[in-house]
């Protein structure tokens, strides 16, 4: 069936939507693929839904191919299973919670580990039943604090989530690898540039974990790569501890007056002026700054945390979040300082921190802060700092915490050279969950020896609605959307741009023939100017267009390629064959 | 790809689930098609999901065929549009409401009239854009007071809902007819026995409305049919007003003592004994009973309502609900009677009721209570009734209300004879909504004369998840499920029931050949007894089974038809051809 622009439920917009921050959001809305219904909640119009359904079909095919079986869980879920795993609380404000008419607590599922675990427990009881992989393509809900970028970070979204169930680690490793390979096939077919990086498992628990990131300047995730092939989300980069240093030649620490030096920069300038080093100048990297946070745990309790790191680095909020999650870290406010009078704001030193200190504030330091290293740091008195405070000699921290920002050029953890940084959109995430959920919910099977063993699980997600945006983000240009052939709502758009019955008759005929040949075709049969039709065809982004217009009088039509912008003229009698040839290439 | 029972995520249960009231619920759970996740909320297992997806595919095909375009709205919706149409309030406890982290009011969509209306308003502005039909296959939520019967009345369910948009009534009529015809095709393909009945439009507003009911003894809806072809849900039956009667020969009304006659039955016995009629005996149909309710309006306000109807009929709660909706009618309690001292419980007569009476309670009477009819009814004094109280002469009601139960044999409104009653499951509902939503939300287009006119709408629903249960309900027998071919998860089940490698080798080969021929095949390759496999194949309900067992030694296999229970033996060399022939029939 030919779809006609005159009847298709679509309108292109001339203006960018006010809230559009990124190209995919801008163009998906302007091209009439999606519409905002509420913050972070979108309606799918016919063209957008077709793309989403194509993504879903690709995902289903590859999941079926590894023997995963499709199921579908409700979005509306009872509280109890999430209570059993603490996630009812741990999810905090990210969880949509509601009550039914009888007052029972319900939630809108953000992810379904609990439900899958319970279902397998309900049906299976023996090692013979395993391995098992189940998946669903389903609508999920997260009450994001800052929904943004259209489909890239929404509050209602479509995910494929799958879960593997194995009797032992070797089985889990195999299931994980099968999913990993299926994901590679899926992302290859979706057609965007992506990278597989080591991931932080975050609130999900578990151990081995990788992310598939679509490379995108507007991505929310930052990842690193090394010359040796190391690749990781910055959240997951684990900088090794620096080598210990022999501090025997370092003189005793000395407290100096440092008036009017509230910043690292002013402090460095002051010590270089008044207390110069003999060997070289002081830099920010010689200073140790101590940053105070209050950790808010999901159960409502709080505790202070001090992070010590070189003055030339900042704490990376996402790395911190990943490290302390599910707790939330909030910077110390005036009230917090008031509660710890031994901490002198702006001049906090290691000796006022730590379990053994008067403040008892837990003190964790950067991996570069190791035994023997000497630091310029706060002296715990207003207007004074201490020079040559040596780790192990003059103070000891409670442990290490690697939450400093990662910088281009930092040494790679694999030792293969400097790291490069880039940004990406998280499209897939694969986890070796292990036994966390099976243990919490009692999923056990009898093993070969008739002994009850706890099942080990993997968890694997793909953002289907996000993939629509990620592909758009990677392919849209200044004229509009530009779909790869296997995701385009229509493969070919036929534009009748000339006047007269002959033009529309030939356009109809060609569209019909393409339709008969099994090509999904969109015919622009509107009473509109050629300019409007050209512009719309570029905004809508079908990979191939055929322009039936003025040239028809000379027996010619034009075939345009949306991605390259190239056009070629062919004889009308060759038009069908030439378009079909285009589709094969 | 052959599916193997040894790997399929399914377990059949020997026992009925405790909460299963109807066969479809019992068997869908026992056969491992669905599992309960919360009251009225179900998870779809692989077999169940396949059936649901087949239903959805049929629905999509027929909706596409009438030119309806698929879109998809979120389930999580903002309050404002529903506030504009009053449904935020009118839905009462049936609506799942929640708040997001910022305190904004959200709801889980029970139906999407508002969202469709606003979307069309967003995109379209001219009569040239119409007619338009849009549809979605989407998950909906209603917080049912009594979720029951598995998928038949759930709180999370899949619906196809579509909406038509026209510039005038003639257009709406055409869109309605197109949907009606598409529905006939859909329900024919789904393969259950159904009836199209006149429906009450209920809380949806609008005028013309029909329901498609699957005929089922366990259905929640009762419908009537007449010899002349009249068919209606009992909620929608409109009994005509009875003909007026000449009461000139009826004597004056007289109050009589009726001690110890609290029921209609005892009252009739007493008046027959003490005040006999000359012409015939008194019957319950000669009495007029007055039933008191408090109407609770969605805005929280209340008002009393008295319903007068012959003593041989009861008020039908569903007809009453349909008539007074969105208000809820609650029977008078002691406190209510206390608030109206002129109403003497058990002896309430028409003269104590009505806008002009001291109680001022609104008084509506049955269509049989018309001018000139004489009644035995309450005398508004304890222990006394009044005989020959004549409508129009001795009292007047405030109007008519037709909420009495409909009974088998009642005259049909079309005059064609007595009504018959049967029960059904509401599978589809088509409405001529009219301009209610377009007016509330300002959906107007410019007509041919450049004048703004309000668009007129139709609304059309099909319960997709409910259809799975309705088909099961109509086809299951005492052995299990029994799917029609076009909805079955697998067309053929091959059972390897004998011992030895030859049996499993031939079963594998046959399954492979069927798979190559494009047949969806389920191979029971488990190490289980023939008895278990036979029983499971009957519970699972694939239309055709092939038993490869003992007969193989003699070169024979058995083909079984699940619906008829018949079996025939064929030679192994003919097995493939015979099974394929079976599928064509």
Image (spheres, coloured by chain):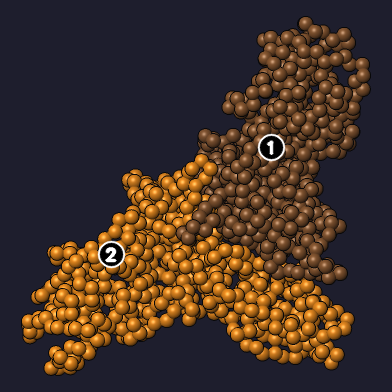
Chain colours: A orange, B brown
Residue at image position (25%, 81%) is: A262
Give the Cα separation between the discs numbered 2 and 1: 59 Å
**SS type, badge 2:** helix
Q: What kind of element bears circle 1?
A: helix
Q: Position of residue A523 (x, y in %)?
A: 76, 76
User: In this picture, is B305 found above or below A434?
Assistant: above
Chain on which label 1 sits:
B
B83 up-or-down from B236: above or below? below
Which image quarter: residue A24?
A: bottom right
Q: Chain of mark 2?
A: A
Q: Residue at x 70, y 80 (%)?
A: A536
Q: Nearer the viewer, mark 2 or mark 1?
A: 2
- For the point 72% across and 62% down, the residue is B442
The residue at the point 48 percent across, 56 percent down is A96
B369 sits left or right of A54 in the view: right
**From this viewpoint, which residue is outermost toward the top?**
B274
How far across and down, in percent of the image, does residue A7 sit?
Answer: 77, 69
Q: Quadrant of the C terminus of chain A?
A: bottom right
Image coords of residue B238 (percent x, y): 81, 36
Picture coordinates of residue B303, whole percent (x, y): 66, 36
Could you tell me how many numbered marks the image carries?
2
Residue under circle 1? B321
């Amino acid at each position: 069936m030919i779809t006609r622009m005159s009847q298709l439920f679509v309108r292109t917009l001339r203006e960018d939507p006010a809230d559009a921050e990124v190209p995919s959001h801008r163009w998906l809305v302007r091209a009439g693929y999606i519409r905002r219904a509420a913050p972070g909640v979108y309606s799918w119009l016919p063209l957008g839904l077709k793309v989403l359904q194509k993504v879903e079909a690709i995902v289903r095919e590859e999941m079926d191919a590894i023997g995963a079986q499709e199921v579908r869980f409700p979005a509306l879920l009872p509280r109890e299973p999430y209570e059993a795993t603490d996630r009812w609380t741990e999810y905090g404000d990210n969880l949509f919670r509601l009550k039914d008419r009888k007052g029972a607590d319900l939630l809108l599922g953000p992810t379904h580990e609990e439900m899958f675990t319970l279902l397998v427990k309900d049906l299976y009881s023996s090692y013979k039943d395993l391995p098992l992989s189940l998946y669903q393509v389903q609508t999920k809900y997260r009450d994001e604090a800052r929904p943004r970028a259209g489909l890239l970070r929404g509050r209602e979204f479509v995910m494929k989530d799958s879960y593997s169930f194995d009797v032992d680690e070797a089985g889990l490793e195999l299931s994980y690898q099968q999913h990993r390979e299926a994901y590679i096939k899926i992302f290859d077919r979706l057609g965007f540039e992506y990278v597989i990086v080591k991931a932080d498992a975050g609130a999900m628990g578990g151990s081995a974990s990788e992310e598939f990131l679509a490379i995108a300047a507007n991505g929310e995730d930052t990842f690193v790569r090394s010359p040796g092939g190391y690749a990781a989300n910055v959240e997951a980069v684990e900088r090794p501890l620096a080598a210990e240093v022999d501090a025997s030649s370092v003189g005793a620490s000395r407290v100096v007056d440092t008036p009017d030096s509230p910043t690292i920069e002013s402090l460095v300038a002051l010590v270089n002026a008044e207390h110069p080093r003999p060997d070289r100048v002081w830099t920010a990297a010689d200073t140790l700054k101590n940053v105070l946070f209050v950790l808010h745990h999901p159960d409502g309790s709080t505790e202070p945390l001090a992070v010590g790191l070189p003055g030339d680095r900042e704490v990376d909020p996402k790395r911190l979040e990943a490290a302390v999650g599910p707790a939330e870290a909030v910077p110390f406010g005036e009230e917090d300082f008031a509660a710890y009078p031994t901490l002198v704001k702006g001049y906090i030193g290691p000796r006022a921190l730590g379990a053994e200190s008067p403040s008892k504030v837990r003190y964790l330091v950067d991996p570069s802060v190791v035994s023997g290293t000497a630091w310029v740091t706060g002296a715990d008195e207003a207007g004074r700092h201490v020079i040559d405070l040596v780790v192990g000699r003059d103070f000891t921290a409670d442990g290490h915490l690697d939450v400093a920002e990662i910088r281009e050029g930092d040494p790679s953890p694999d030792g293969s050279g400097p790291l490069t940084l880039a940004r990406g959109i998280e499209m897939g995430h694969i986890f070796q969950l292990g036994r966390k959920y099976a243990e919490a919910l009692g999923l056990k099977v009898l093993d070969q020896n008739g002994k009850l063993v706890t099942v080990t699980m993997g968890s694997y997600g793909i953002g289907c609605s996000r993939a629509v945006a990620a592909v758009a983000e990677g392919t849209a240009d200044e004229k509009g959307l530009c779909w790869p052939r296997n995701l385009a709502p229509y493969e070919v758009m036929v534009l009748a741009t000339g006047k007269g019955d002959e033009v529309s008759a030939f356009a109809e005929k060609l569209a019909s023939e393409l339709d008969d040949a099994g090509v999904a075709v969109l015919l622009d049969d509107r009473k509109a100017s050629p300019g409007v039709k050209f512009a719309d065809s570029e905004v809508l982004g079908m990979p191939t267009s055929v322009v039936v217009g003025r040239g028809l009088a000379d027996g010619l039509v034009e075939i345009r390629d949306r991605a390259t912008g190239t056009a070629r003229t062919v004889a009308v009698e060759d038009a069908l064959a030439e378009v079909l040839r285009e589709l094969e290439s």
